[in-house]
Amino acid sequence: MTQDKILGKLCFQCDENLRPEDFELLKLLSEVIVGLFDAFLLRASLLSDREEMIRMSVAEKMLATMAHNIGSRLAPLPLLLFRYRNLEKKYSELSAVNDSLDYFASTTLDTVKRAKEFFALPTPRKASIDLPARIERTLHQALPDETWVLECQDRQLELAVDYHLLETALLELIQNSRSSARDPNQLRISITIKIESRQSDFVTIVYKDNGPGIHDDLKERIFEDFFSLRPGHDTGTGLGMGMVRRVIEAHGGVVFARPSAEGAEFVITLPRQ
């Protein structure tokens, strides 16, 4: 037995002629074997921790490089938008399209700007927002209207959050639903926003899809960085759900996967103040 765990048991069949000093030698042999196993397990643990640190460091450097390159590629977007705005006098129907392009450009450039903070606990830049209206806009931008439903009893629910971060987390959940869907054309997503009582200091957001769901054994592991499991689909980077948890925790909230009869279900709880 080591200091931390039992490794196993060795049995010796000894006859009555075994001398006491021989028994002491067997005890010494056992201690040597245990010492070797203990050292091996410690070395394996240290190597695993070192490999994880190396992977995280490499991932951070790759992400920073990608963010820089993507930012350079997207830098002309504001100029392109300016040119399209000038055409609105001639083509009035461009106004609505330009509004969508403006939203896309600003949020995309902001995402690239914050990409270097991906592995750190982000610092939310909070502002009071109409939460149902903003989530509805995100769903409308990301999904066909017939594939989603938003339920909220209080349609004027104000909440102080960094909606860019919160929207990024929501889009990650949507992308995971798309990637895991058996048939993308049959994908359905529902979001319910509720306050348990008027005295409650928290808002709960329940996200559901009709996909294959999450096995009970994996409900915690899916939030680990670099863990990815999509049966029947290409494996992802394993970084998205870890980001989702960091975003929610940065707001003082919690997120977890809840057992569901069908599909995946995530519960997000955020403080109202």
Image (spheres, rainbow, N blue to C red):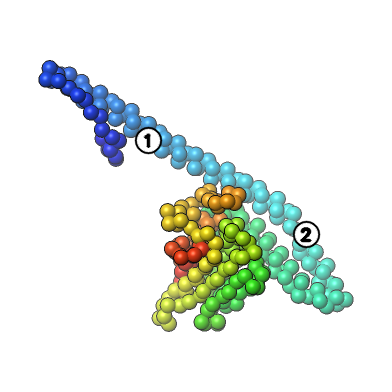
Q: From the image, state whether disc 1 or disc 2 is nearer to you.
A: 1
Q: Residue furthest right?
A: 90
**Which one is nearer the viewer's eye here, 233 or 240?**
233
Q: Residue at x 33, y 33 (%)?
A: 38
Residue under numbered circle 1: 42
Label 2 Cα crowd, 10 Å radius (few <14 / some 14-19 / many 20+): few
Of residue 138 and residue 248, the one placed in the foreground of this image is 138
Real-space CA distance between mark 1 and mark 2, rounded to the nearest whole angstrom: 53 Å
| Image coords of residue 42 (percent x, y) | 37, 35
Q: Is residue 7 left or right of residue 165?
A: left
Secondary structure at numbered mark 2: loop
Query: Where is residue 51 shown, x and y percent of the image?
Result: 49, 39
Identify residue for label 2.
76
The residue that appears at 25% across and 29% down in the rendered structure is 10
What residue lies at 60% left-to-right and 77% top-to-bottom?
133
Q: Quadrant of residue 127?
A: bottom right
Q: Amino acid at mark 1?
A: Leu
- Residue 120's place in the image compared with 273, above or below, is above
Depth check: give the residue in front, 106 or 144.
144
Q: Amino acid at mark 2?
A: Pro
- Residue 254, compared with residue 41, is above or below; it is below
Q: Quadrant of residue 211?
A: bottom right
Between 58 and 242, the one nearer to me in the picture? 242
